[in-house]
Image (cartoon, grey):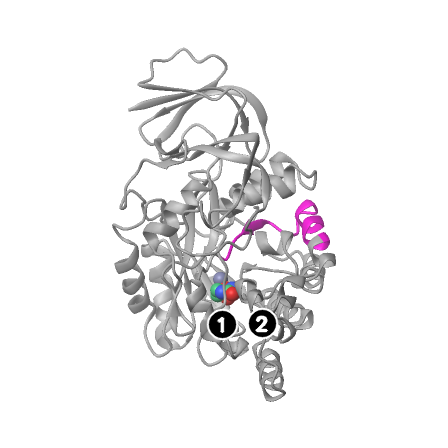
Amino acid sequence: MSTLIKNGRIITATDDYVADVFIEGETISAIGKNLNVNASTVIDAAGLLVMPGGIDPHVHLAMPFMGTFSSDDYETGTRAALYGGTTTIIDFVLQTQGKSLQHALDDWNSRAKGTAVGDYSFHIAVTDFNEDTKKEIKHFIEEEGITSFKTFMAYKGALMIDDRQMVGLMQEVKKQGGMVTVHATNGDMIDFLVAKHKSEGKTAPLYHYLSQPEITEAEASSRFADMIHYTGCPGYIVHLTCEGALNAVRNATRRNQHLFVETCIQYLVLDASLYENDFEGAKWVMSPPLREKKDQTTLWAGINQGLVNVVATDHCPFMWEQKLMGKDDFSKIPNGHPAIENRMELLFSEGVNKGKISLNKYVEVASTNAAKIFGMFPRKGTIAVGSDADIVLFDPNEKHTLSASKHHMNVDYSGYEGWELTGKVKSVLLRGTVAIDDNKCLVDKGYGQFVKRKGPNSKA
Ligand code: URP
Ligand code: ZN
Ligand code: ZN
C-alpha cells in the first residue's frame, strides 16, 4: 500500500515548505518536490497544511475516579482524538494503594487492547511507593516501554504521595533512566480549604476554584522543582495553569534542570469567570481549576519563551448526570473536562490564527515536544523519512462551530459550545492509513497500537 500526498504545505517544528510526501506501508519513505513515484492512492493537498499527527500526553480514558468512571473509553476517546487531529495519546495507569504497578497495568491493558482506534501509550501513576514498587520500576522502563512515572501531590487519601516517597521514587527512576511527572498542587492546603468552605455551607462549584488558589500550585511546583534538582531526576509538571507556578519553573531553569512543563488548552483559552454561573460551572470543575486572564497571558508567553513545552488536554470527561453527583457539594463533582477532540483546532484558532504563536511553535507544542520528552521521537512527532506516517491535513481557513451536537466524544455537553473557530482538520492518516476523511472515521476499533517508549530526551 502506498500513498502520495501532493503539493501540501509541510509544517514541522522547524520547517515550512511545499512538497510531496510519499508513504509506503506505515512510514514515510520520501519527501520532495514533484516526486515521480507510483502510488496506489494520491491525495491532493494543495492549499492545506500537512502537519505531524497531534500527540496528547495527558488523557484519562475509562478511568475509575471519584466514585465513577470517565465517560470516554478507549474506543470513543481515541476515535474522537483522531477526528480532532490527535493520532497518539498517553493515558495514565493508576496504581491502587496497597497493590502492585503490574496489577494496575493489567487492568488498563484489559480496557485498551483491541479497543483503541488511535495509537496510545501509558504513563504509570505511582500512588504507593514502597520497597515492592521500587523493584518494579526497572521492568516498566526496560520491558514495558513505560518510562514516565506520574505522581500526585494532591488527592489525599487516594492518589497523593508524600515527599519521602517522592524523593525515593525520583532516585530509583533516575537510576533506571526514566522521568517523574507530577500533579503539582499542595494537597494539605487544598484539603484545609475544602473543609473550611464546606463548614461555612459554601457548596457551589465556585468554591472548588476558591479551594485551590494559585499559591497551592506555586508552592508545590517549586517544591517539586527542588526535589528534582536534589535528585537529578528528569521531571515534568502536568497541567500547569498559573503565573506563580511558572515563575517557580523560571527560577528552576537557572539551575540548568531537566524540568519540562505542560499546560492544557483550557487554561490558555478559558478563565475562572465560568465558575460564577452557579451549578453550570461544574462543567469546568477540574484540578487545578481555571485561572485568571493574567495567567493566560503568562502561559502564552511561557510557550514562546520555551518554558511551557507541551499543550495537552487532561481530557477527563464526565456526563452531566455524573457532574450532578456534586450538586450539593462541590467536592463530590467528578474533576475533569472534555477536550481531546478540540485541542488541535482550538490551539490553531486561538493561538496561530490570533497571532499568539507561530505555525512552527504550534507543531512543536501540539506534537513534537511530547514525542521528544516522552521517548517517541522521531517515530512520532514529525514529518521525516522513516517516521510513522501520522499526518494531519488541515485547512487553515475553514470556519466551523464547536458543539456537543457534532462532537464524537462520549459526553453530553461541550466546554466550548458555540465557539466559532477558524481552521479545521480535513483528513488524518495514522501509520499510513487514512483514518479520518470528510468527517468520517475509516478505521475500526482495534486499529490503535500501543507505543513502547524510550527514556526522556533531555534536549527537547
Ligand atoms: O480535574 C482533573 N484534572 N481530572 C483528572 C485527574 C487529574 O488531576 O489530572
Ligand atoms: Zn492532575
Ligand atoms: Zn489528568
Q: Where is residue 187 drawn, in percent x and y?
A: 56, 77
**In the rendered structure, does residue 312 fall within the stretch colored magenta?**
yes
* Residue 224 badge: none
Q: Position of residue 25 (x, y in %)?
A: 31, 28
- Label 1 Cα crowd, 10 Å radius (few <14 / some 14-19 / many 20+): many
Q: Nearer the viewer, residue 192 or 404?
A: 404
Residue picked out by circle 1 = 333
Type of the residue with mark 2: Pro
The relative height of residue 43 versus residue 452 in the rendered view (above or below) is above
Q: Which residues are magenta?
A: 297-314
Q: Which mark is residue 205?
A: 2
Instruction: Relative to 50, say whether 92 is above or below.
Output: below
Image quarter where the N terminus lies is top left
Q: Is residue 255 magenta?
A: no
Instruction: Residue at 42% x, 41% y: name it.
Output: 83
The residue at 44%/46% (across/down) is 407
State the residue in front, 221 or 433: 433
User: Along the line of sight, which residue is nearer the eye, 203 or 238?
Assistant: 203
Q: Are marks 1 and 2 in contact (CB under 8 Å)?
A: yes
Identify which amino acid the numbered label 1 is placed on: Ile
User: In the image, residue 327 lies at what x, y percent?
Assistant: 50, 75
Which structural element holds mark 1?
Answer: loop
